[in-house]
Image: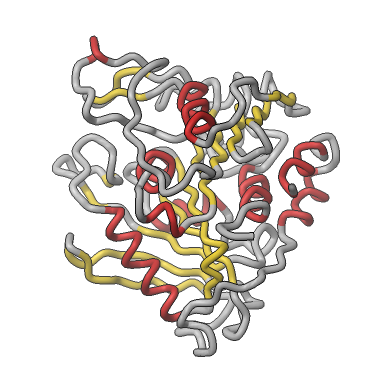
Amino acid sequence: MYFMAFINLLVQPVVAAAAAATTTAYRGYPTSGCGSPAPCIPGTFINSTIETNNGSRKFGIWVPENYDYTVETGLIFSYHGANGNISNQRALDQLTNPEFNTDYIVAYLQGVKNSNGSTTWQGAPGAPADDIAFTNTVLDKIQSQFCVDSDHIYATGKSQGAGFVGQQLACNSKLSARFAAFAPVSGAYYNANITEESDCKPESMPAPCSPSRTNIPILAFHGGADSTISYHGGFRKGACLPDIQYWVRQWAQRNGLQAYPSDVHIPGSDGGFTRTYGNGTVMLVYDGDNIPHDWPASFNNSDNAGHHLTSFNATTWILGFFNDHSLRK
């Protein structure tokens, strides 16, 4: 599998890995948008709105420059963090930067503000909107307008957006069936049903989850110095957060993978490692002891503010993981 080979190449330059991550060959499960010219110019980003059961919602679409409306193309959904927006997430994940991504259409969804004025995603305490339905509606719309390969649809996100990806979208009994893999970064995997701190047990808390299948690919990133969403979990905003190693292990168990994973040190990191379960369907990337609530990158971004740079780029690894997983092979 591609990403397992990618892990074995960790000691080689990131540039070589990045080049490998952007090479993809799709073999079709086309949608109704195939054969119709795109509603935008390839290589551009457009903002749009769509009607949902929570009113008009905002989203954006980026189309790679080499997009061909007769060729099935993969699609990535990306979700910003709490109090964030589409522009923040685009700058952070770099998925609209051709230096990273030349193959995938990217959809960015905008969260809704809660009663405190904070932008949230479904699953977080006080989140007011049905973001599962929102995602489903946007996916239907994109598939009707673009030539999407329905075998290669993915989701990633940061913080609360990552929590939505890993604990809501991947756990949804219906919508998870439309996504091939999930890659949450610094995820906030709230269980809002646990409302008392005395009941919050991060290493054994229940995590309600009803995925559509038993082979859900998960690639989760988290830093050891994350003081916003602790790597060890805990009680926050009136809800319980899991220990990250426990949360990843739960996914391995759902997928029926071995209990004893293999760890590989990340060269150039402060204690960072990748933890692989089974054949690589479930993976944890521990960014390092010194990495806080960041989207890991070897260059400056809005998270690392010029410090806490990593020896790897999460975006490159996410694309490699996505390339390695499809719904049907």
Residue displayed at 77% across by 43% down: 6
Q: In the picture provided, is 13 more to the left or to the right than 297?
A: right
Q: What residue do we see at 79% from left, 43% from top?
A: 5
Vertical arrangement, residue 127 with respect to residue 195, above or below: below
* Relative height, residue 170 to residue 146 (above, below): above
Q: Look at 61% across and 26% down and name the residue there.
A: 258
State the image coordinates of residue 176 (x, y, percent, origin top left). Answer: 42, 52
Report the side of 63 relative to 10 (left or right).
left
Is 51 in front, or is 288? 51
The image quarter in which residue 203 lies: top left
Q: List the single residue furthest toward the bottom.
A: 36
Q: Position of residue 145 (x, y in %)?
A: 44, 81
- The number of numbered discs placed on residues in the rendered structure image is 0
User: With 90 as the anchor, is 274 left or right in this view?
Assistant: right
In the image shown, does 194 or 112 lie closer to the viewer? 194
Going by the picture, which residue comes out furthest to the left? 115
Q: Indicate the position of residue 128 as horizontal and vertical percent values.
A: 18, 47
The picture places residue 165, in percent across and down from the top left corner, at: 42, 45
Compared to residue 199, the image places residue 186 above or below, namely below
User: Where's the C terminus, which quadrant?
Assistant: bottom right
Q: How is the image coloured?
A: secondary structure
Q: Is residue 154 visible?
A: yes
Q: Is residue 161 visible?
A: no
> Residue at 35% across / 43% down in the picture?
168
Q: Quadrant of residue 14?
A: top right
